[in-house]
Image: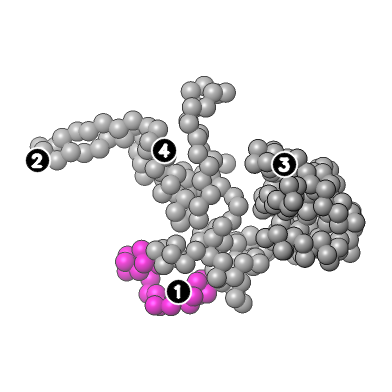
Amino acid sequence: MLKRILDIIENKEHQRSEFKENFGKEVMKTICSFSNSIGGTILIGVSNDGTIKGVNADAEIIKDWMDRIKLGTQPQLFPAMNLIKFENKTVVEITVQEFPVKPVSCKGRYYKRIGASNHLVPLNEIIEMQSSSFNSSFDSFSVNESVDDLFSDVIASYFHEVKSRGRIELSDNNLLNLEKPGFIRKGKATFAALLLFGEHHTGIHIGRFRAPDVIIDDILIKSPLVNAIDDAMTFIKKNISVTFEFTNDTRRVEKWQYPLPVIRELLLHPVR
């Protein structure tokens, strides 16, 4: 990871990289520009000339930055962030991928990357971006990750379960099983594959509240979505009550506080 950062610094700022000493509005503009272009990397704690100065950052500060990015962009962006130590200094790597449904705005304004600079997108290009994205599907867009970056055990478990139901005829080759429905395109994963089987840097945040402003238990689930629903259900079941009834043949039947199939359906199809 450190070698990658040093390589980025050595190549200086360009179309896909930018250096900032601190997190601020200019970083937000660059995130927006990268998402409207071909993606890129921002190094926080590095001066424009490539000098590593470090930045005061930890997990809590990263969380605050992520919240600011989420609230300041539309559609909301969730770039990957990494804390990297270099000679007692901290550098934060922000990796932004090209967003499939363009344009993305930052505080109501649209930017794109030209060379090593961010530029406002003129109205005619905004309209063109919107038209190009009109028939695009977010989950069918290719990302930088390949099939090797996905979790093979999760993929194998998923297709084993699908095959056991007997409704779909599957190959013994899981790569073909991924390619057939479009999870893999030209050797690259789609957003759908990344969400289902990979490390996607998004999550499900669930909390139990005693009052509107008092939370007594919560969990942030970032596992692949094929596992995340089960993880979410486990947390919910831990936080709702259950009673037991006995039938005439002395079998014990669980009676949950809320119907579990309904809760699962809400997780899969949240009400907006």
Q: Name the residue type under label 2.
A: Asp
The residue that disc 2 covers is 249
Q: Mark 2 vs mark 4: which is more N-terminal? A: 4
Quote the CA–CA distance across marks 3 and 2. 61 Å
Q: Name the residue type under label 1.
A: Asn
The residue that disc 1 covers is 174
The residue that disc 3 covers is 57
Q: Mark 4 vs mark 3: which is more N-terminal? A: 3
Query: Residue 132, can we see it?
Result: yes
The residue that disc 4 covers is 236
Quadrant occupied by the C terminus: top right
Q: Name the residue type under label 4.
A: Ile
**Disc 4 on helix, strand or loop?**
helix
Residue 65 figure quarter: top right
Q: Which residue is the extreme one toward the front?
A: 87
Q: In the image, which is nearer the foreground, mark 2 or mark 4? A: 4
**Disc 3 on helix, strand or loop?**
loop
